[in-house]
Every structure is written in structure tokens, then in C-alpha cells.
Image (cartoon, rainbow, N blue to C red):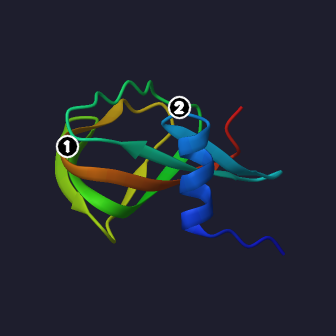
Amino acid sequence: MQVFRLDDLEAERSANRGNYLRFLNERNMSAGLYALSPGELDTQQPHGQDEIYLVVSGRASITVGSETAHVARGSVVYVPAGVPHRFHHITEDLRVMVVFSPPEA
């Protein structure tokens, strides 16, 4: 069993000065913590894996393909492999748990 604490993951992500921290990489999935601040640009490119976002904190909009939704703590978003997507109009520091299947390369 592996157990992770969000506070510890956020501290590690921040210490490494990056927007993304991959903390799990297994045979069938990987997981990470993604962070964006108000005014920051989400420069993601489409991924080769299906993806689930769980918004841990913050508020923003997300566009997946041609659809846009507002998200906040507790929102869960599924993004199919290969579909363009990005967070935007971030109004509060955004922290998002990301799960990829199969694992990201």
C-alpha cells in the first residue's frame, strides 16, 4: 500500500519549483498533482492517455475539446486521450489531482 498526503505532495511540488509533480507511476496508471495560480497559463498539450482531474482546491474554467465548464473543489473531469484541453480563467490557486491510464510516459 502507498499512502500520500496532499500537504506533503504540495510541499514537494513547490520545492521542485514546477507546476506538476508525478507521485505515482504504476503498470496501469500514474498520478500527479498539478498547480496553477491566477493569471498563469496552462500550456498542456493533448495526452496519449485517458485522464481524470479531481479539483482539490481553487476555482477555474476548463475547456475540453469544444466544451467549457467551471470547476472548483470536488469537481471531477474526464478527458479522453488525444483531446485538447486546458484550464483558464483561474480565480483562486488551483490544485488538481491528475490520474492517467495507462500511465503517462
Place of residue 40 in the rendered image (x, y in percent of width and height, measured from the top left): 27, 31
- The answer to the question of whether label 1 and label 2 lie on touching residues, with beta carbons closer than 8 A, is no
Give the amino acid type for the residue marked by disc 1 in the picture. Glu
Where is residue 103 shown, x and y percent of the image?
70, 44
Give SS at disc 2.
loop
Whole-number angstrom distance, CA of label 1 to CA of label 2: 17 Å
* Amino acid type, callout 2: His
Query: Is 43 situated above or below 62?
Result: above
Q: Quadrant of the C terminus?
A: top right
In which image quadrant can residue 68 be found? top left
Residue 29 visible? yes
Q: Residue at x 55, y 66 (%)?
A: 6
Work out which quarter of the rendered image holds the N terminus and state it.
bottom right
Residue at the image position 69 percent from the left and 51 percent from the top = 23
Q: Is disc 1 placed on a helix, strand or loop? A: strand
Left or right: 8 as drawn, with respect to 20 = right
Q: Where does label 2 land, which residue? A: 47
Q: Is residue 53 left or right of residue 14?
A: left
- Judged left or right of residue 95, residue 64 is left
Closest to the observer: 14 or 1?
A: 14
Decide: few, some or many residues near mark 1? Use Cα within 10 Å; few <14, some 14-19, many ≥20: few
Q: Which residue is mark 1?
A: 67
x 19%, y 43%: residue: 67
Residue 93 spot, x, y in % from top left = 29, 51
